[in-house]
Amino acid sequence: EIVMTQSPATLSVSPGERATLSCRASQSVRSNLAWYQQKPGQAPRLLIYGTSTRATGIPARFSGSGSGTEFTLTISSLQSEDFAVYYCQQYNHWPPLTFGGGTKVEIK
Amino acid sequence: QVQLVESGGGVVQPGRSLRLSCAASGFTFSSYAMHWVRQVPGKGLEWVSVISFDGRDKYFADSVKGRFTISRDTSKNTLYLQMNSLTAEDTAVYYCARDPGIAVTGIADYWGQGTLVTVSS
């Protein structure tokens, strides 16, 4: 099973600032990496798949990069609606599909 | 628009069974693989199971293998998760989610709002 590790667990950012979230895989997942956003009381929402392809309707301020075992989600200028928990997920080696433990982006 | 609506959650005693349903609309249900993902309240996401578009291929997390089954009814546009021999560790919000491929890609592009399953005596 591939273990996904996200850091930091919590990221405090001021509105308008850039946020950089990290995700590490225990072995290479090539580019088969997705990011999800989850707000309190809501279901997760797909943000990015294939490491860097934004899902339908996702604003350009969200970008993904990386390959192999190291991945990054960048939010270029945080908006109020972006404060949430973000999960990475690998889909290269499955079953099982595996998620990281999440990074909470909170208002500084 | 794509809609997924889960139902069937509730409080159940350890060792008992429960069947979850996920009603799909807004897309051609028979053309997409479907997932179940669960989340203990306040914790992270755990993938549970996936079924291919035609129901032939099914995969499970080790934590539920042999106890849970996944199925789909194309005539009703509904996905199911039959959960047997439930334990407290199965307590979670259960989400159904669509896979964007006919063949399973492993991505979940649309999610339902979830249904809470609580296993408690």
Image (cartoon, grey):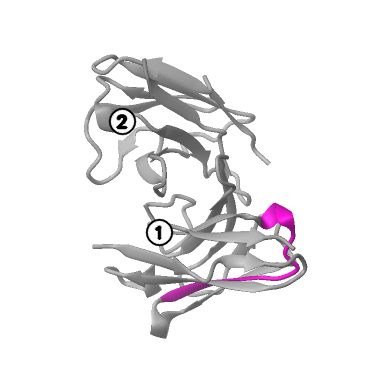
Residue A106 rendering spot, x and y as whole percentages: 39, 23
Residue A85 percent across, percent down from the top left: 44, 33
Q: Secondary structure at mark 1?
A: loop
User: Which image quadrant: the N terminus of chain A?
Assistant: top right
A35 to A41, vertically: above or below: above
Q: Tell me where residue A12 sits by quadrant.
A: top left
Q: Is residue B80 located in the magenta-colored stretch of the structure?
A: yes
Q: Which residue is the extreme one toward the bottom?
A: B75
Residue B112 numbered tag: 1
Quarter-of-image position of residue A18: top left
Quarter-of-image position of residue B20: bottom right
Which corner quadrant holds the C terminus of chain A? top left
Is disc 2 placed on a helix, strand or loop? helix
The percent coordinates of residue B25 (x first, y second) are 31, 71
Q: Is residue B30 left or right of residue B106?
A: left
Q: Are the residues under badges 1 and 2 in a single subunit?
A: no
Residue for point 22% across, 30% down: A60
Q: Magenta stretch: residue A46 in it?
A: no
Residue B25 vertical placement versus A82 (above, below):
below
